[in-house]
Image: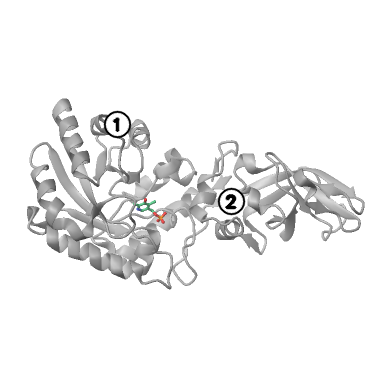
Amino acid sequence: MELSAPALRRNMIRVRELVGSDVGILPVVKADGYGLGVAEVVAALEPCEPWGYAIETVAEGRRLRSLGVRRPALILAPVPPGEVEAAVAAELRLAISSIEALERVNEAAAALAREAIIHVEIDTGIGRAGFDWRQVGHWGPEVDRLTNGRVRWEGVYSHFFSASDVESNAMDIQGDRFKEALRGLSGQRDGRWIEHICNSPGLLRRPDLGLGLVRPGIFIYGGRTWPGLPEPEPVVRVRARVVLVREVPDGTTLGYGATYRARGKERWATLGIGYGDGIPRALGNGGAALVQGRRVPIIGRISMGVTVVDITELPESSVKSGDEVTIVGEDGSEHISLEEVARISGSISHEVLTRLSPRLPRVWL
Ligand SMILES: *Cc1c(COP(=O)(O)O)cnc(C)c1O
């Protein structure tokens, strides 16, 4: 895995240009920085002075603290009851979706005799977490009451469920619901909190909804959201080495299940990479790799540590063991994007990145 810190940083600068200088940026570094390696991601982003970092678990927040990150760190998911105190102790901001959870934060803050900071999540349609946007009148005053002591109510946010589907108007509907909920809350605290709703596709499509903060994830890691929207620079390349080249006779079967059979004499190259490295198994008999700047098909099922490509179309003896092959990224004028890999494997670029396993060395450029 070859990673470009300058490209990551340029994508972050692009976000800054898109949202303007008044909006804070809260890069999402959950799941080890989308699988790239959170330490290097944070080091690359620090010069851009983000407002803070967003994560999903207490362990991820503690990791940031152990890396010396002092900026705000917001956990964007409900925290299991047993971990609330650890979150407060590590000065992690908590997303709150229920009164019960807020009571626990109060108890933790009292037990530790220190301040706790929360962001209220409003569910405008994603359904997985958040207070119901239609019931602000019920929970708003309760939240207000429970944030008068050691607990500081810093932010209010929501999350889009279809922001990358440009055909859908769900984003506008959710934006309206969010604003309606904020109006319902305006009796509390004179609305003196930070508001945020935009993930990557959200800020690309509706930079006007930037409000106080934006939460870009996939865009800074080089994932495209939708054709026609601004594109990030690629950050990640995945390459493998040819470990064996063979010429096989007609009818030779390949891989588990013998799902591929040579049609005439063929030349095959075995690559030292497989699903154990995080390459989606679904690329078997459907995906491609780049060899010498040319696209060649992945044939047969992908094994844990090896993948085979058909190089019959390439000049004889031109491919040797030790040669580099591109699985994600560019080679000459050809390019295999994260989105292509995601599409063939029935997934999204976020999942493709986060599944690249620790066995693949991360080489930062
Ligand atoms: C993951 C996540 C993001 C970032 O989403 P991208 O599509 O990667 O930009 C933003 N907000 C929340 C709540 C998230 O869970």
Which residue sits at x=32%, y=57%?
A: 159
Query: At numbered mark 1, what does the secondary structure look like: helix, strand or loop?
Result: helix
Residue 323 in percent (x, y) is at: 75, 47
Which residue sits at x=54%, y=55%?
A: 347
Rendered position, 111 above or below 60: above
Q: Nearer the viewer, residue 139 or 277?
A: 139
The 10 Å Cα crowd at callout 1, few under 14, some 14 to 19, many 20 or more, is some
Which residue sits at x=28%, y=60%?
A: 124
Query: At numbered mark 2, what does the secondary structure look like: helix, strand or loop?
Result: strand
Instruction: Tell me if I can see residue 113 in this picture.
Output: no
Q: Quadrant of residue 11?
A: bottom left
Give the CA separation, mark 1 to mark 2: 36 Å
Q: Is mark 2 within 8 Å of ligand 1?
A: no
Which residue sits at x=82%, y=59%?
A: 314
Q: Nearer the viewer, residue 324 or 106?
A: 106
Q: Which residue is mark 2?
A: 237
Mark 1 against mark 2, which lies toward the viewer?
1
Q: Nearer the viewer, residue 181 or 342?
A: 181
Residue 354's disc is none
Could you tell whether 97 is left or right of 244 in the image? left
Quick one: quadrant of the N terminus? top right
Residue 363 in percent (x, y) is at: 56, 41
Rendered position, 303 above or below 63: below
Q: Quadrant of residue 170?
A: bottom left
Sequence-first disc among 1 and 2: 1
Residue flagged by tag 2: what amino acid is it?
Arg
Q: Which residue is mark 1?
A: 83
Instruction: Tell me if I can see residue 320 in this picture.
Output: yes
Q: Nearer the viewer, residue 207 or 330?
A: 207
Residue flagged by tag 1: what amino acid is it?
Glu
